[in-house]
C-alpha cells in the first residue's frame, strides 16, 4: 500500500503566492489611478494578449461564456447569422459551449468526439452539416488543440464560420500558431483555475476581423461605442481594470507555467503506464497546454476513492454531458454513446505548475498501487 501524502487538485493560493508582490503592486496601481473600468490597464492587456495569441485584436469581457456569446451575437448584428441557425459543438464539453449558442437564438448540434483526443471528430462534423449549419465551434478540451487543419478545410469548403472555444487552451500552439488564431474568432476564459487565470471572473474575444472586434467591443458595453449612443442592444460584460492589471503580470509567466505542466504530464504518462488506467493522448507536445490531465477508467469512482484515501485530490470534468442536462430537454433523446461513456469514465488528476516533484511521484505511485490492488 502506498503512503499517504496530501496532494491538492489545485492550490490557487500557491499558484498566486509566487507572484504576490507583483499582483499587489498591480492592484495598488489600479486603486491609485482612480479609473476602474475600460481604462489603460485593459487597453494594455488587450494589446499584449492579442500579440501573444498572434492576432490583431483582443477584447476583454466579463467571463469566458460572454466571450463566446458576444461573438455569436456580433455575427447576428453583422448579418452573418439569424435565429434558428445551427452551430456544431462537441457533445463532450462544459455546458457553457452550448449556452453561448442557445442564448443567441441558435441551435447547438452536438457531435461525438474523436475517441483518442476527445476533441471534435472532423468526419462526424462533416456528416452533421445541414442546410442551417453556419458555425463550427471546436473546443480545445482540457487544453489540447482540436484538429484545426481538418476543421478549417471543412469550414472553408462549406462556407462556415469557425469559433474556437479556447477557454482551457491558453498557450497551446501548432507550427507557430497559438490557440485563438486558427478560426475567425475565439473565446478565452480567465476564471481563476485556468492556465491564465484572473483573481475573479474574466474573459476575452480574440480575432483578426476588424469589424467583428468593433462590434464585440460595443456589445460588451451596452451596445455603445460613444457614451449614451446605443445603436445596438448590448450587455454589460467588461473585463475590470484590476483583473486586467493582474493578468498582465501572469501573462509574463504563462509559457514557463505551460512548460512545467508539460513536464508533469510527461512524468504522469511515463510513470502511470501499464497501471490499468487509460492515459490521455497528445497529438504533439506543443499542441497541448495541459489545463487538465484527464485519465479514463471503467471503475472511475473506485479509482477516485482509492486515490482520495492516499491523499490525492481528483475531480470529474464533467460528470453529466450537456445533452443529458435538464436545461436541454430537446436534446435528451440523442444517442451519443461515446460521449456518455467518456463522462462516466473520466477522472482529472492533480495538475498545476506548482506541483512538486514529490507530489507528482506520489500521484504516480498511488495510481500504480491501484493496479496492484486490483
Image (tube, rainbow, N blue to C red):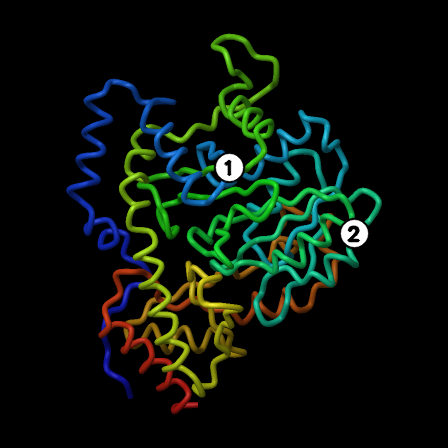
Percent coordinates x, y for residue 238 in the rendering? 43, 28
On the image, numbered disc 2 is attached to which residue? 129
Mark 1–mark 2 CB contact (< 8 Å): no
The relative height of residue 59 versus residue 94 in the rendered view (above or below) is above
The secondary structure type at the circle numbered 1 is strand
Could you tell whether 333 is left or right of 325 in the image? right
The relative height of residue 122 versus residue 184 in the rendered view (above or below) is below
Relative to the observer, which residue lies in front, 252 or 70?
252
In the rendered image, which quarter contains the N terminus? bottom left
* Residue reaching furthest to the right: 131
User: What residue is drawn where x is 24% and y is 72%?
Assistant: 357
Q: CA distance from mark 1 to mark 2?
A: 25 Å
The relative height of residue 194 versus residue 311 in the rendered view (above or below) is above
Q: Residues within 10 Å of mark 2 (few under 14, many from 20)?
A: many
Give the quarter of the image for residue 78: top right
Percent coordinates x, y for residue 283 in the rendering? 53, 68
Give the quarter of the image for residue 91: bottom right
User: What residue is drawn where x is 40% and y is 81%?
Assistant: 272
Percent coordinates x, y for residue 281 in the rendering? 51, 72
On the image, numbered disc 1 is attached to which residue? 205
The secondary structure type at the circle numbered 2 is loop
Percent coordinates x, y for residue 310 in the rendering? 29, 77
Amino acid at each position: 500500500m502506498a503512503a499517504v501524502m496530501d496532494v491538492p487538485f489545485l492550490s490557487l493560493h500557491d499558484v498566486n503566492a509566487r507572484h504576490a508582490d507583483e499582483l499587489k503592486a498591480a492592484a495598488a496601481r489600479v486603486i491609485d489611478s482612480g479609473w476602474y473600468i475600460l481604462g489603460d490597464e485593459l487597453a494594455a492587456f488587450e494589446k499584449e494578449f492579442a500579440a501573444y495569441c498572434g492576432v490583431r485584436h483582443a477584447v476583454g469581457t466579463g467571463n469566458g461564456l460572454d466571450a463566446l456569446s458576444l461573438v455569436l451575437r456580433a455575427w447576428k448584428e453583422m448579418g452573418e447569422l439569424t435565429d434558428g441557425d445551427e452551430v456544431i459543438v462537441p457533445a463532450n464539453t462544459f455546458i457553457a459551449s452550448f449556452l453561448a449558442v442557445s442564448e443567441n437564438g441558435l441551435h447547438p448540434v452536438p457531435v461525438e468526439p474523436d475517441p483518442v483526443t476527445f476533441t471534435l471528430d472532423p468526419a462526424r462534423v462533416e456528416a452533421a452539416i445541414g442546410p442551417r449549419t453556419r458555425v463550427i465551434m471546436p473546443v480545445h478540451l482540457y487544453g489540447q488543440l482540436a484538429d484545426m487543419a481538418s476543421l478549417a478545410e471543412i469550414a472553408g469548403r462549406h462556407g462556415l464560420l469557425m469559433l474556437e472555444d479556447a477557454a482551457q487552451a491558453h498557450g497551446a500552439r501548432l507550427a507557430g500558431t497559438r490557440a485563438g488564431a486558427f478560426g475567425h474568432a475565439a473565446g478565452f476564459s480567465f476564471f481563476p483555475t485556468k492556465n491564465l487565470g484572473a483573481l475573479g471572473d474574466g474573459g476575452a474575444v480574440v480575432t483578426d476581423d476588424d469589424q467583428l472586434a468593433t462590434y464585440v467591443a460595443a456589445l460588451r458595453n451596452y451596445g455603445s461605442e460613444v457614451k449614451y449612443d446605443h445603436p445596438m442592444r448590448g450587455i454589460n460584460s467588461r473585463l475590470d481594470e484590476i483583473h486586467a492589471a493582474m493578468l498582465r503580470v501572469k501573462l509574463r509567466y504563462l509559457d514557463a507555467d505551460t512548460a512545467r505542466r508539460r513536464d508533469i504530464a510527461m512524468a504522469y504518462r511515463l510513470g502511470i503506464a501499464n497501471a490499468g488506467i487509460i492515459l490521455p493522448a497528445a497529438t504533439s507536445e506543443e499542441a497541448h497546454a495541459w489545463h487538465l490531465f484527464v485519465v479514463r477508467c471503467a471503475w472511475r469512482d473506485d479509482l477516485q476513492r482509492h486515490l482520495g484515501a492516499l491523499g490525492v485530490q481528483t475531480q470529474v470534468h464533467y460528470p453529466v454531458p450537456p445533452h443529458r442536462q435538464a436545461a436541454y430537454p430537446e436534446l435528451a433523446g440523442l444517442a451519443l454513446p461515446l460521449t456518455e461513456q467518456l463522462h462516466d469514465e473520466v477522472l482529472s488528476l492533480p495538475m498545476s505548475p506548482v506541483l512538486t516533484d514529490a507530489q507528482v511521484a506520489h500521484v504516480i505511485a498511488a495510481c500504480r498501487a491501484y493496479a496492484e490492488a486490483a
